[in-house]
Image: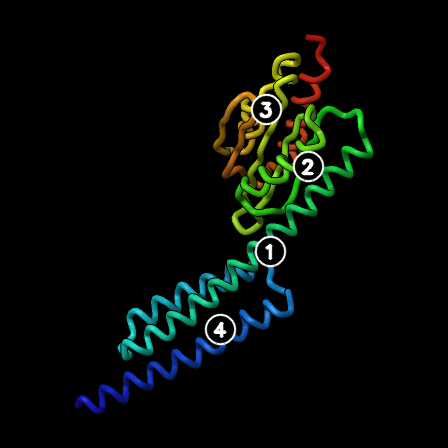
Amino acid sequence: MDRKFSKTCNKKADQLDHSLQDLSRRVRDSSSLNTTSISSRLTFNKEIFQFNENISQANISQWRREYQRNQLKELKTILIELDKADSKNQITKAVEQCRDILTKYPDRKCLIANFEMGNDTKNLSTVINQIRTQSTDVAIMLFSVDHETDKFVCLANVSDVQVKEKHLKANEWVQKVIAEANGRGGGKDTQAQATNCDAKQLDHCVQLAEEFVLLKLNSSS
């Protein structure tokens, strides 16, 4: 009975090893060829999570379970590094695009731009911080759409001068956007953000954001 059970456990472990080798090959091939998109990395992460669940429930020896888990950790690390590299590349391109716009139109007092950088405002914040090193008196609102969730986020940043002289406040600017997109948001006079906004309303919200900021900046008060 014990021998039969042991044979069954080894067979199951072999099957898991085979599946793990296939997953590892696909992740590493995609990484080496630099063909991993955000959606494919999400798919890989889901596979890794499910595989870990299968390992936990399988009747296999502990040493093989630990070996397979370590293999999954290595794959997870690869995907994390790819995410970091992708974010860095997206930030660099976004900063270049924004600076090109401001260079082409040096007298403009606002910058509104839309990117595909997922549903996290951290990357947008990094972009704004880099733009601010050269453009200190520009009102900025950046959008980022996530096609996986059909949601977008936005981040607004306003200079102290614009708050005082033009009564332009980042939190009011953001509220104008999320009112049309069923999002959540808030912040301070100089910086505010919105999350979980309906991507179907993105174009309309960009238009509203531009109308609102121009109305404020062109006012005489």
Question: Is residue 189 toward the left or the right of residue 137 in the image?
Answer: left
User: Which of the colour schemes (rainbow, by chain, secondary structure, one colour) is used?
Assistant: rainbow
Callouts 2 and 4 close, C-beta under 8 Å: no
Q: Which three-letter amino acid code belongs to the residue tagged 1?
A: Ala
Which one is earlier in the sequence, the residue at label 2 or at label 1?
1
Q: Which three-letter amino acid code belongs to the residue tagged 2?
A: Ala
- Residues at marks 2 and 3, CA–CA distance in whole angstroms: 15 Å
**Residue where numbered disc 2 is placed:** 113
Question: Is residue 132 toward the left or the right of residue 182 in the image?
Answer: right
**Residue where numbered disc 4 is placed:** 23
Question: Is residue 96 toward the left or the right of residue 156 in the image?
Answer: right
- Residues at marks 1 and 3, CA–CA distance in whole angstroms: 32 Å
**Residue where numbered disc 1 is placed:** 85
**Residue where numbered disc 3 is placed:** 173
Q: Is residue 1 above or below residue 78?
A: below
Q: Which three-letter amino acid code belongs to the residue tagged 3?
A: Trp
Q: Residue most toward the top? A: 221
